[in-house]
Image (cartoon, helix red, strand yellow):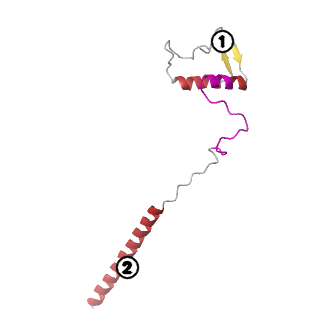
Amino acid sequence: ELGLPPLRGATASGSGSSSSGAAAAASAANSSTTNDEGEILSLSVSETDALRLKLGLAPLKKSGETSAEGSSRSTAIHVKPHNATAEREAKRRIEDAAARRDAGEKIRKLERENNR
């Protein structure tokens, strides 16, 4: 028992209309909460982080903190992996088409010579 008031929209069984994890995260992410009398209670970042740890959530990011990968989503560039098999297959199909085209041109040239 954490001694916290129930989340907004929570029923007697503890499940609300939204998922309890999302509601807990939204509640814990706020910098203030209310007690039973409706007073607004301010929480510092360290207090919020302690509450989030009790709820099983990750602590809030501090300003200037980078992600574990060292880059943010906005600067990350995705490059498709090199697929040598697909490249070989495409090259083979192009060569086959060129060979058929050349053979067709040679056949038409021979037919024209035979018709003279």
Q: What x and y, as percent, mark residue 58?
A: 63, 30
For badge 1, the amino acid type reads Asn
Q: Is residue 112 left or right of residue 57?
A: left
Q: Above or below — where is 114 with respect to 43? A: below
Q: Above or below — where is 69 with respect to 94? A: above
Point out which mark residue 35 bears: 1
Majority SS type along the magenta span:
loop
For badge 2, the amino acid type reads Asp
**Pointer 1: residues within 10 angstroms few (<14), some, or many (20+)?**
few
List the single residue furthest toward the top: 37
- Residue identified by numbered label 2: 102
Q: Is residue 96 left or right of residue 54?
A: left
The residue located at (71%, 22%) in the rendering is: 47
Gap between marks 1 and 2, in whole Å? 84 Å
Task: Answer whether residue 40 is magenta in the image.
Answer: no
Residue 115 in view in this figure? no
Q: Earlier in the sequence, mark 1 or mark 2?
A: 1
Position of the N terminus by quadrant? top right
Q: Above or below — where is 71 with respect to 102? A: above
Point out which mark residue 2 bears: none
Residues 67 and 31: in front is: 67
Residues 78 and 49: in front is: 49
The residue located at (53%, 22%) in the rendering is: 20
Residue 1 in view in this figure? yes
Q: Which residues are magenta?
A: 49-72
